[in-house]
Every structure is written in structure tokens, then in C-alpha cells.
Image (cartoon, helix red, strand yellow):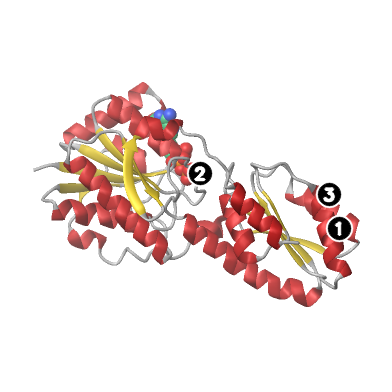
């Protein structure tokens, strides 16, 4: 009987629970024993592993966060830490480990697989910043959370004829900002991948004002090459109007996962089990459109993200 473990690591993302559920139930359905590892690599190093049964993952599908909890674990960056993790894994007879997390967590999995523990990685981060896959778990929910917030802000922004600059997450990746900008009807979106063009923004605001538009929503990704306060001041100076800022912050990481996130989490979690049921090692699970696939982990991590220029063009065209 094969025995596998599952852990969540790095930043939490809505849908991680759905992925854990798919791993646990997928493993049990395939006559495998499965351990849940608490607190990511930190828990693995300490042997905080608990055998899971069907009931262990009852009623978690719709919950945000991760019931296995997550952690950042600096010891994993050392040879000694990796060795300790391998020792603990063999103590529990693990044949393989499913790692649910972002790129850092994947690097941890790679280190473990080089030392003999087979791994399969499921991408979960709201940032959608992994080049090899179209979707990461949590991204769709985060975008929806942003769009809901924009709807609320738009009501008050319109009532007062204000411009509001909304800062969203994404680190070095502009996907959340861009998607929220298209779905939320923003006048301009600042993303890390494209140099800010204030000239275009100001002209757009002037044009809007000339046809009677007093309120505007502007989105700034946290990694964009211009600060939120700087932006607010520049727009206020130019328009001589009221400009507010809203930083959405950690609320973007919470909430019940969307149907789409639950579906991709279920598909990818189950694929990870199938990979470990076979002889797969150091595999990255991903989605191309609605199709799930797996590929070499190192190769997946070597890929470079390309920003969706079509989406930028759409955004720019509709924001005239
Ligand atoms: P997010 O994208 O949401 O931040 P992440 O998985 O990228 O998620 P990190 O904090 O970068 O989050 O990584 C999570 C954990 O993975 C780290 O705390 C560490 O334990 C492990 N890890 C990261 N990089 C390495 C590495 N090079 N070698 C071994 N383990 C690593």
C-alpha cells in the first residue's frame, strides 16, 4: 500500500482546502494511505503528520484558507533542514508528497525530490504568477473579491464625483489588477510588467471630464512602478478634484472559493495523486484552459511569465 503526504505552504489561497480534499479522497479511492502535514514544511520537519480519512476533509470544500494551515519555514533553505524533512518522511513511510503552494514551496519540493522523496506540486497562489500554468488556485476568487470591492467603491465614487485609486495584490505579477480592471471597468490599470504612462492617464481623465464623467476607478497593482500615494497626489494636482485611495490588502486572500477555483483545485489535486500512484517524481501540475496536465517541475520553474498583451489592449480600448 502506497503512503503519501499532503501539505500547504507559503501564502494561503482560497481553494487550498478543495485541493487537500481531492488529494485525500483521491488517495483513499486509490487504496493509498494519506497523511496531512500541518503547518507546511515547518510541520514536516517536526513530524506533525496525521493520517486522514474520508471524514477528515468533510465540509472543507467551501472554506477559504487551509485547514492544514500554512507557514514559511526558513530551515528548508538549508541542507540540514531538507535532510530532517527527508528523515521525517521516511519515519512515516512516505512514498511521495503533494505540495500545494507557490514557487517557493515548489523549490522546497524540488530539494526534497533531489534527496529521494517523490513530489507532485499543485499551484496555489492568488497572484497567478507561475509561468507554466494558465491558472493557479485562489486567483479567480481573489479577482472576484476585487471586483466586488470595486462595485462598492464605484457607488460612493459616483455619488461624490470622485476618482478612486484602488491598490490590489499580485506582487511582481499584474494579472489580478488587469482582470479586475477589465471586469470592474477601470479607467487605467498600473501593472509591474508595463511602465506607467501618466500622460495617457491624464488625457483619458480630461477626455472623460469633457464628456461629463466625474468619477473614475484606477487600479494599481502593488508591484507597479509607481506608488499609490504618489499616484493619488499627481492625479489630484492635475484634476484639482477629490482623489481617494483604497488598499484592499489581505481581504483578497480570504473568502469562500469560487466554483472555478474549487473545480481546478479538485482536478489538480486528483492529478497529483495519480502522478504519485504511478512512478512520477518532481512533477508540476497545471491547467491549460480547462485541461489539467503535469510536467517536469524543474522545467516548469525555468519558464518565464509572459504578460497577456491582448488583455492589456482590451483594457486600453474599452477605457477610452
Ligand atoms: P506565495 O507565492 O503565496 O508566496 P510561496 O510558496 O512562493 O507562496 P514562499 O514563502 O516563497 O511562498 O515559500 C514557502 C516555503 O517554501 C518557504 O518558507 C520555505 O520553507 C520553502 N522554500 C522556499 N524556497 C526554497 C528553496 N530554495 N529550497 C527549499 N525550500 C524552499
Q: Quadrant of residue 40?
A: top left
Q: Are marks 3 and 1 in contact (CB under 8 Å)?
A: no
- Position of 147 compared to 237: left or right? left
* Residue visible at 43% across and 33% down in the picture: 301
* Residue 108 position in % (x across, y down): 37, 33
**Quick one: 218 or 57, which is closer to the camera?**
218
Disc nearest the viewer among 1 and 2? 2
Can residue 319 be seen here? The reply is yes
In the orientation shown, which residue stands out farthest toward the left? 1
- Residue bearing mark 2: 129
Q: Which residue is the site of mark 3? A: 199
Quarter containing the N terminus? top left
- Residue position for label 1: 236
The x and y percentages for residue 300 are: 40, 35
Q: Which mark is residue 177?
A: none
Q: Nearer the viewer, residue 10 or 285?
A: 285
Q: Nearer the viewer, residue 308 or 141?
A: 308
* Dot 1 crowding, Cα within 10 Å, few <14, some 14–19, many 20+: some
CA–CA distance between discs 1 and 2? Answer: 32 Å
Instruction: Measuring from the top left, give residue 109's x and y in whole percent.
Output: 34, 34
Circle 2 — which element? loop
In this rendering, is residue 274 above or below 251? above
Separation of marks 2 and 3 at Cα, in angstroms: 28 Å
Position of the C terminus, as image quadrant, is bottom right
Query: Which type of secondary structure does the marked residue at label 1 adopt?
Result: helix
State ligand 1's quadrant: top left
Q: Is residue 207 above or below residue 151?
A: above
Mark 3 vs 1, N-terminal side? 3
Amino acid at each position: 500500500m502506497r503512503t503519501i503526504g499532503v501539505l500547504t505552504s507559503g501564502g494561503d489561497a482560497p481553494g487550498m482546502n478543495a485541493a487537500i480534499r481531492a488529494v485525500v479522497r483521491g488517495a483513499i479511492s486509490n487504496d493509498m494511505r494519506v497523511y496531512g502535514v500541518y503547518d507546511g514544511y515547518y510541520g514536516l520537519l517536526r513530524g506533525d503528520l496525521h493520517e486522514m480519512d474520508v471524514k477528515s476533509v468533510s465540509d472543507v470544500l467551501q472554506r477559504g484558507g487551509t485547514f492544514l494551515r500554512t507557514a514559511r519555514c526558513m530551515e528548508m533553505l538549508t541542507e540540514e533542514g531538507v535532510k530532517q524533512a527527508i528523515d521525517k518522511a521516511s519515519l512515516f513511510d512516505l512514498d511521495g508528497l503533494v505540495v500545494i503552494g507557490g514557487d517557493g514551496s515548489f523549490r522546497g519540493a524540488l530539494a526534497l525530490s533531489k534527496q529521494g522523496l517523490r513530489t507532485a506540486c499543485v499551484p496555489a497562489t492568488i497572484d497567478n504568477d507561475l509561468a507554466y500554468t494558465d491558472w493557479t488556485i485562489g486567483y479567480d476568487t481573489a479577482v472576484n473579491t476585487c471586483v466586488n470591492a470595486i462595485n462598492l467603491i464605484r457607488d460612493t465614487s459616483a455619488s461624490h464625483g470622485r476618482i478612486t485609486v484602488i491598490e490590489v495584490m499580485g506582487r511582481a505579477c499584474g494579472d489580478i489588477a488587469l482582470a479586475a480592471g477589465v471586469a470592474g471597468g477601470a479607467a487605467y490599470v498600473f501593472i509591474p510588467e508595463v511602465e506607467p504612462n501618466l500622460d495617457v492617464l491624464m488625457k483619458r481623465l480630461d477626455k472623460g471630464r469633457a464628456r461629463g464623467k466625474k468619477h473614475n476607478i484606477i487600479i494599481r497593482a502593488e508591484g507597479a512602478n509607481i506608488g499609490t500615494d504618489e499616484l493619488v497626489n499627481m492625479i489630484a494636482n492635475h484634476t484639482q478634484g477629490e482623489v481617494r485611495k483604497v488598499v484592499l490588502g489581505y481581504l483578497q486572500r480570504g473568502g469562500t472559493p469560487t466554483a472555478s477555483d474549487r473545480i481546478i483545485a479538485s482536478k489538480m489535486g486528483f492529478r497529483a495523486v495519480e502522478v504519485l500512484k504511478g512512478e512520477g517524481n518532481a512533477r508540476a501540475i497545471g491547467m491549460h484552459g480547462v485541461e489539467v496536465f503535469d510536467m517536469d517541475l524543474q522545467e516548469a520553474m525555468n519558464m518565464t511569465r509572459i504578460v497577456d498583451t491582448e488583455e492589456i489592449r482590451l483594457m486600453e480600448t474599452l477605457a477610452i
